Image: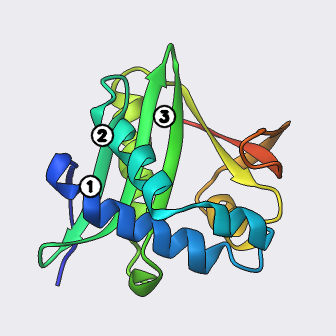
């Protein structure tokens, strides 16, 4: 069965939150400190994604198979630079190529809207995700940060867009 990519809508909120929390709680466990993983409550996740879906300056796209949301990406264009703010694929849907499809979709859409490059942030200790992004052509550009909300180092990755 194929996975369809489509714009997310308000009715997708519960499914997006479920994918996000599955990733946060399963994929980040052992990668990030337990205190950070445990701090992402159901209510906090729902509030985060409700605001993301209501934002007019970003695009949210979901990957759906048989009516089930399996992945989500959120991205925006800022000048001539795209920003991929989120990419989450259900741990139960790994191996379908959905992460790459969502990331390619975001890159292609941003390029079509005038972006010449795109950025994303990844936790420095998240080796699996960093490896995935590198395989997709995203490379560290030397910029790092520690957001107060997370307290963990992040690395900025950049990709030139055609």
- Sequence-wise, the earlier of marks 2 and 3 is 2
Report crowding for label 1: few under 14, some 14 to 19, many 20 or more residues within 10 A (C-alpha).
Answer: some
Q: Does residue 51 lie above or below 13 as drawn? A: above
Q: Residue at x 79, y 46 (%)?
A: 155
Q: Residue at x 41, y 46 (%)?
A: 47
- Which element carries disc 1, helix, strand or loop? helix
* Name of the residue lying farthest toward the top: 79
Q: Does residue 153 appear in the picture of this structure?
A: yes
- Sequence-wise, the earlier of marks 3 and 1 is 1
Inter-mark Cα distance, 2 to 3: 28 Å
Q: Are marks 1 and 2 in contact (CB under 8 Å)?
A: yes
- Which element carries disc 2, helix, strand or loop? helix
Q: Is residue 59 left or right of residue 67?
A: right
Q: Which residue is mark 1?
A: 13
Q: Dividing the image into 4 quarters, which one contains the N terminus? A: bottom left
- Which element carries disc 3, helix, strand or loop? loop
Q: Does residue 73 lie above or below 63 as drawn? A: above
Q: Which residue is mark 2?
A: 53
Q: Does residue 142 appear in the picture of this structure?
A: no
Residue 49's disc number: none
Residue 104: x %, y % from top left: 42, 52
31, 47: nearer the viewer:
47
Q: Is residue 112 left or right of residue 148?
A: left
Residue 2, picture quadrant: bottom left
Name the colour scheme: rainbow
Q: Residue at x 12, y 73 (%)?
A: 67
């Amino acid at each position: 069965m194929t996975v369809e990519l489509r714009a997310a809508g308000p009715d997708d909120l519960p499914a997006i939150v479920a994918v996000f929390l599955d990733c946060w709680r399963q994929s980040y466990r052992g990668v990030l400190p337990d205190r950070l993983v445990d701090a992402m409550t159901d209510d906090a996740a729902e509030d985060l994604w409700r605001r993301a879906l209501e934002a007019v300056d970003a695009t949210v796209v979901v990957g759906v198979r048989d009516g089930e949301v399996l992945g989500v990406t959120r991205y925006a264009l800022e000048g001539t630079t795209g920003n991929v703010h989120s990419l989450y694929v259900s741990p139960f849907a790994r191996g379908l190529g959905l992460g790459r499809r969502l990331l390619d979709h975001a890159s292609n859409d941003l390029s079509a809207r005038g972006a010449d490059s795109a950025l994303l942030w990844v936790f420095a200790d998240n080796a699996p995700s960093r490896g995935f992004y590198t395989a997709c052509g995203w490379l560290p550009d030397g910029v790092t940060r520690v957001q107060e909300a997370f307290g963990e180092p992040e690395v900025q990755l950049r990709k030139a867009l055609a």
